[in-house]
Amino acid sequence: MSAQQQDQYEYGNFIADEEIKPASRRFTSYNPTTGKVWGSFADSTASEVGQAVDAAHAAFKGPWGALSPTRRGRLLMAWGAKIAAEADRIAALETGQNGKLFAEMRAQLRVAEDWLVYFGGLADKVEGSVIPLDRTSVLNYTLREPYGVIAIIVPWNSPTFLTVMGVAPALAAGNTVVIKPSEVTSASAIELARLAVEVGIPPGVVNVVTGLREAGEALVGHPKVRKINFTGGDRGGRAIASAAGQRLISSVLELGGKSPNIVFADADLDRAEAGVLAGIFAAAGQTCVAGSRAYIQRPVYEEMVERLRRRAAAIRIGDPMDAETQMGPIATQAQLAKDEAMVKKAVAEGAEILHGGERLRLDPFPEGYFFSPTIIHRLSPANSLLREEVFGPVLAVIPFDDEEEVIAAANGTDFGLASGVWTRDLRRAHVMARRIEAGTVWINTYRAMAFNSPFGGYKDSGIGRQNGQEAIYQYLQTKSVWVELSDEVQDPFVIRAGR
């Protein structure tokens, strides 16, 4: 199926096992490949958001809370298998909305099963502990208990993958969720919720409300929402953290990045070339971990830059549903405009375009949101392109001389989500891993992720961790229980030694 062969879709909210049409308002979604209308969704009001939260709260207090952890885990595993079986269908919906390659979206749908199997397996392995008190007549133990309703707010670039990263540990811990997907890619979250019901997850455990800013603010501010998981830009993250702080609830925030990809002269240049390209152009730069700053040691700088320029010029751009396409469009008109504006700003500040830097009009998609793979060089250290996240296929290349120089440059940003280091020197690799201020350091690889390895940011790139055992504890709170076992009356006015 090509990007041109599509129907127009219409969705409502998904609350407590049924799709509910909006009371009044809808918003329109566009296909970035064609620039044409893709479909429409409920533009939820605060009242409609409240219905979803109430359903989630009722499920938490009712059937979901009554299930054993083992049973919860088995249902998550079954949900993962169902999602994987529907990968092609849902991936096509996602590609139609965000323009990313169908092959990438399908792979993310399929790998979602690994996350649900992993966290499903962890569900019955959450244990408390017995505290060895000095007061020997007391049994003191801890319980780890869920919060209740968790708000999951998801961006458009990897909708299913990022939804599952938040939802899987939250549900495994015993919470229920209300998902608010991006208005750009709202369809897949509703499809996932339908599949959850099909495998037996009780109504109200997984709910979806779509909409714009009002819906998001209503969800974050609802008194029955006890924790927030947000993936998106740092400005949105600050607003959510502030709103959560006012309510004295916590949040897990995975925010922006300006990740350095560092190539030393002793690196395997073939592997480094592939890694730098994958880090920025494989997803059209529309990933939070995009390696948008390539620092290349001076002895190999000219050769490496020419390799990158030549490969960028050969990237096949077009229909993301076509298996031959290597890069699709930018997801939205607003993001396309941002890409253009940030490139112009970088040039105005003294940088030069080595390749690309412009919108593309492709036949047969003249209204599509395509932008050329862009490489920019000769940037001063103060250039805005080295500090601000683009979220598009724009790579800055910068030469460096030694470790101290590149560490200072790599850390010279408010972000700290990810980084890459390419070298054959074992000592250098570990020194760089320790000194780079980022939540993930990839050495001789890039853009790798696993369900059992923690992921999150330093500095302005976020709070908390997703994936791995750390993730499930983000959704549990600890209770300390004290049980006096002796029959002796504890007179409050008698003080005994050793008690």
Image: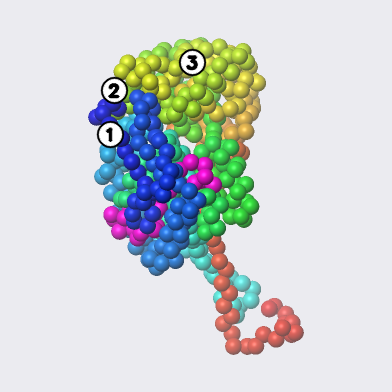
Residue bearing the label numbered 1 = 7
Instruction: Measuring from the top left, give residue 177's x and y in whole percent.
Output: 44, 54
Depth check, front residue: 170 or 177: 177
Residue bearing the label numbered 2 = 324
Q: From the image, which quarter does the N terminus lie in?
A: top left
Q: How crowded is the residue under tag 2: few (<14 C-alpha within 10 Å), some, or many (20+)? A: few
Residue 253 covered by magenta stretch: no
Residue bearing the label numbered 3 = 357
Image vertical order of residue 491 relative to residue 290, above or below: below
Identify the residue at the far front of this view.
24
Can residue 179 be seen here? The reply is: yes
Identified at 47% across, 15% down, the residue is: 358
Amino acid carrying label 2: it is Glu
Q: Which residues are magenta?
A: 196-217
Label 1 sits on a secondary structure element that is: loop
| Circles 2, 1 touching at the beta carbon (< 8 Å) | no
**How far separated are the C-alphas under marks 2 and 3?**
23 Å
N-terminal-most mark, 2 or 1: 1
**How far separated are the C-alphas under marks 1 and 3?**
33 Å
Which color scheme is applied?
rainbow
